[in-house]
Amino acid sequence: MEPFRVFISSIMNPDREDLRPEREAAKAAIERFSPISTAWAFEHATVSSQPLLDFYLEAVKACDLLILIVGEEMTEPVRQEFITARDHGKPILVFRKSVSQRTPEAEAILREADKKYDDFADAAELARKIAIRSGPNSWRSFAEARPRGRCRIHRSPS
């Protein structure tokens, strides 16, 4: 059986907002259940000859679950990942970082997601919440929606 593939989506530009600790925590929480699950994070993906947008949106289409991490800001690539997941019927879990201020774009994606999100204060709390909300007990409900004949995601060794 193929592992349950979880796409990690968040802003990646540390000059705008540094969510690297949260992304690493999310990846570790998902891969804690390896070989049942595997995380797909852009920064750990293998090199590709595909155009950049196609590369990560194909990974969204091939995933079984998208984890959306929303902090202060939102970028168009993250919004496109969310839209692609939604339009392809992927389950989406939204985690909202507790911040003093959020841009209108970040607030808009939370409204557009129209999902009950979970708040977190730091990377450690996010990892705990992801492990609880997306662990093996949740895979069954997500797996029922899993389409047959998907493409395989290749990831680089960590």
Image (cartoon, rainbow, N blue to C red):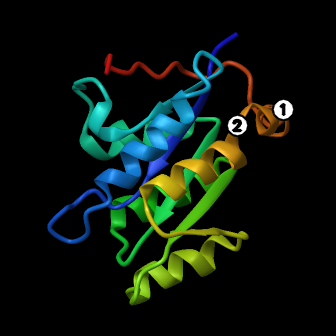
Give, as a three-letter code, the residue at label 2. Gly
Residue at 41% in and 72% down: 71
Q: Earlier in the sequence, mark 1 or mark 2?
A: 2
Residue pushed farthest left? 15
Residue pushed farthest front? 124
Judged from the image, the secondary structure of the residue bearing numbered disc 2 is: loop
Report if residue 58 is visible in the image.
yes
Query: 35 or 63: which is nearer to us?
Result: 35
Whole-percent x and y of residue 36?
Answer: 65, 20
Residue position for label 1 = 140
- Left or right: 143 with respect to 68? right
Residue position for label 2 = 135
46 to 75, vertically: above or below? above
56 to 17, vertically: above or below? above
Query: 41 or 118: which is nearer to us?
Result: 118
Residue at 56% in and 28% down: 32
Mark 1 crowd level (few <14, some 14–19, many ≥20, 10 Å Cα) = few
Mark 2 crowd level (few <14, some 14–19, many ≥20, 10 Å Cα) = some
Q: Quadrant of residue 113?
A: bottom right
Q: Quadrant of residue 46?
A: top left
Residue at 52% in and 28% down: 31
Residue pushed farthest top? 1
Give, as a three-letter code, the residue at label 1. Arg
**Alpha carbon of mark 1 to alpha carbon of mark 2: how far?**
10 Å
Whole-percent x and y of residue 108?
Answer: 52, 82
Residue 98 has which mark?
none
Whole-percent x and y of residue 157?
Answer: 32, 16
- Left or right: 12 with respect to 114? left
Which quarter of the image is occupied by the N terminus?
top right
Judged from the image, the secondary structure of the residue bearing numbered disc 1 is: helix
Query: 61 or 132: which is nearer to us?
Result: 132
Report if residue 89 is visible in the image.
no
